[in-house]
Amino acid sequence: MKRMLRLALTLCLLASAGHCAAQAIVRKSFARAERQTALLDSLLTAPDLFPASWNPDGTIKTNTARGWISGFFPADIWLLYEYTRDAKWLDMARRRTAPLDALRHYTKTHDLGFMVGCPCSLAYRLTRDDYYKQLMIDSSEALISRFDPAVGLIRSWNNKDGKANPFRVIIDNMMNLEMLFLASEFTGDSRYRDIAVTHADNTLKNHFRADNSCFHILCYDAGTGSVVTQKGGQGYSQTSAWSRGQSWGLYGFTMCYRFTHDRRYLDRAVKSAEYFINHPNLPEDKVPYWDYYAPGIPDEPRDASAAAITASALLELARYVPEKEKLYYKTAEKILRSLASDRYLIPAGEKNGFLIDHSVGSKPSKSQVDVPIIYGDYYFLEALLRLKNYKSHK
């Protein structure tokens, strides 16, 4: 009996030590985020510009509200408010979110879920201000205008010539479905949910390979809805595995399972998680190269943003898969420990206030390679909050 009690006590102490270590990562990273976000806000004097990434010449790359990254900096600030409950972050979050009102009826992008959904879902949850709810509803109406029933998908990019073909769909688009699910919950209107489910079903059907990796871009025929070709897009090649794309797929189908409880979506998320965890080219610190088959591995750039997205997704997925919970939790914790290390976490006062370094936007386009990128910061903070609030015993 005494041996069993000693064993139980030892296990409790180990679990407590693990919990304390995880919370230390959270505290350290949010303390750094407070300093960096205040700096970035002070440097970004134009109220209608949004930070995208850090340029090697020391300047900030910015976008207008119509850039797909516009929602992430306001969302970062909402996460800081959620963590600290300090009114100064609430005031800043409202101020930085306000210019996104211009997107309320904007129909020329599929990325409204990133641009409006990420910050406004937080804003509504934390304030219960119906303004943010209505902004998401209106933006969802704009988003579903891009849905084509004949193809069964939301068009990602418009063609410059205005023609229907090719009808391009990217794996990133899975992330924009969350706002549609929320819009249905807010309004009771099933159209938003039905379109989200149809898009997810066709992505599930067509976007993944037999080895459980996914393509970045699929081109459909707008008349028949059949797949015409696949493209490598921001990955190394048509047959490689762009790391952030794999993360979008994992996160997107985990989120879809949350809203639908459709087992097919859960199975897809598990396969994507296993692809990440078991990949022979995944580095020891669990921060992937920008493409799992980039030709110069191990001398290729990492993508910290892909790691952050994956960590956040795994911490949600762990709750849905009891038999894999410990594995997914520990993998996510390892990623976050790496991102909070000196290799990735930017020193206070440096790089204009961005938070984590070594992300890759599009290496084939030589755009934003091995630099801090704002969506990496956002998913890092989101994952840290999920780690902080994780209740299950490990």
Image: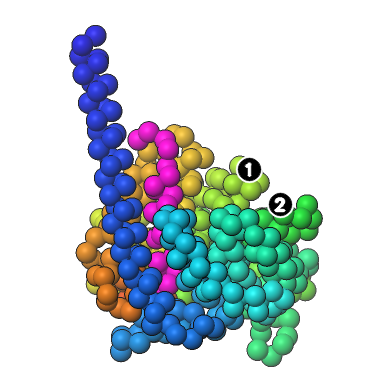
Q: Is residue 16 above or below residue 92?
A: above
Depth order, front residue of 90/271: 90
Q: Is residue 277 above or below residue 297?
A: above
**Local crowd at mark 2 within 10 Å, few (<14), some, or many (≥20)?**
some
Q: Visible in this render: residue 207?
A: no
Magenta residue check for 160: no
Q: Which residues are magenta?
A: 373-394
Hey, what amino acid is under mark 2? Glu
| Residue on which the image places disc 1 | 261
**Local crowd at mark 1 within 10 Å, few (<14), some, or many (≥20)?**
few
Hey, what amino acid is under mark 1? His
The residue depicted at 72 percent of the width and 72 percent of the height is 142
| Residue on which the image places disc 2 | 185
Depth order, front residue of 11/262: 11
The residue depicted at 48 percent of the width and 47 percent of the height is 316
What secondary structure prevails in the magenta region? Answer: helix
The residue depicted at 29 percent of the width and 34 percent of the height is 15
